Structure formats: structure tokens, C-alpha cells
Amino acid sequence: MFRKKVSISLIVLCMIAASMLSIPGKPAFAADAGNTSSTATNMGSLGGDGSSLSTTEYINPSGDIDWFYFTGVTRPSRIRVTLTVPSGKNYDVYAYDKDLVEIGKGTKGTGYSEDYYVNISTQNIGKVYLKVIGVSGSYSSSASYTLKAQNSPDKAIKAVRDAYTYA
Ligand SMILES: [Ca+2]
Ligand SMILES: [Ca+2]
């Protein structure tokens, strides 16, 4: 019993520490985002309509892959994903649901930033994963990219929500 209590408080302490480390825009240390979904960097919890999360990182060295995820999606949502790509580079960003099923992608050519919407339905509510890659070895050790996720419900989703939350 005692041991169980200790382990639970350890877990709580770790969760508190982890949440402190993932304050958007104020990383405790600069670390490369994980190269796999299981080592994805937590962007934080996405707030309500219009709120956003963003992170600035590097694709470095060539072949680097950066996985992120965010939480806070607890109902059907429409999320705008934008990736500001360093000039002259070709980076793409893929979106996946909690089961790592692809739900969106931005794959424009060199020099273009990526910008698209993903819809989270009742079936795939949960963590949303984002993966940033450098296409054909594109990378930069000096110019960063900025990845942003914004809660952007369309009118239809808002209407359904308002109907359900009416009380
Ligand atoms: Ca990485
Ligand atoms: Ca691209």
C-alpha cells in the first residue's frame, strides 16, 4: 500500500515537471523534437475557439524528423495547421489522430509554407500528432521553422456544439 502511494505521488510529480517543461514559447531547454511518434514533443493543451499553440524548431541535420503532439481536443473540432518554412527550403507537415491515422498533410513545394485544416470527429477525439520533415534532405541549422495549431471551428461545427451545450 505504502509503495503504491509513493509511486502515485512520483507520477504526479513527473506530470507536474513535464507540464512545466512544455510551457509554450518558454522551453526549459532547447531539445530536438523526437524522431518517432513515441518520442513526440508535447506542444501543450489546445484551448477553446481561436486559441493556438506554436513551436519553433529546426530540421537539422538532413533527414531529421520532428514529431509533436497536443492535447486538449475533447470534442469535434476543426484545427488549422500552419508551418512557416525557411526561405528556399521544402518542409512538409503531416497530421495524425490518436491512433496515428493520417488526417491531413501539407506538401507544397520549395519556398512555400504549409497551411491546411484537419477535422477531428467524435471517432478520433484525443491526441493530435504533427510530423515535420525536410523533403529530399532539405534542412537548415540556422533558419528555424514555426509550427502552429489553431482551434478554428467552422460555422457548422459551432452550430452543432451550441445546440448540444444549450442549457
Ligand atoms: Ca527530430
Ligand atoms: Ca513543403
Image (spheres, rainbow, N blue to C red):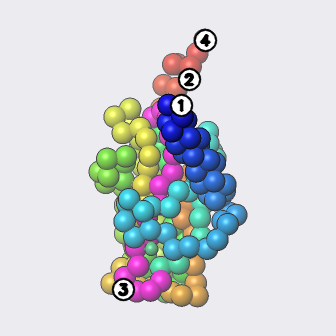
| Mark 2 vs 4, N-terminal side | 2
Name the residue located 52 percent from the left edge and 19 percent from the top edge: 163
Q: Specify the quarter for ligand 1.
A: bottom left
| Mark 3 vs 2, N-terminal side | 3
**Residue contact at pointers 3 and 2, CB within 8 angstroms:** no
**Residue contact at pointers 1 and 4, CB within 8 angstroms:** no
Q: Where's residue 56, x and y in %? A: 59, 70
Name the residue located 34 percent from the left edge and 34 percent from the top edge: 123
Give the distance between the C-alpha atoms of the residues marked 3 and 4, in whole angstroms.
54 Å
Q: Which residue is mark 1?
A: 158
* Highlighted magenta segment, given as a residue range: 60-76
Give the distance between the C-alpha atoms of the residues marked 1 and 4, in whole angstroms.
15 Å
**Residue contact at pointers 2 and 1, CB within 8 angstroms:** yes
Mark 1 burial class by Cα count in 10 Å: few <14, some 14-19, many 20+: some
- Mark 1 vs mark 4, foreground winner is 4
| Mark 3 vs 4, N-terminal side | 3
- Kindly identify the amino acid type of the residue bearing the numbered disc 2: Asp
Q: Is residue 156 above or below residue 136?
A: above
On whether residue 37 falls in the magenta region, the answer is no
Q: Which residue is mark 2?
A: 162
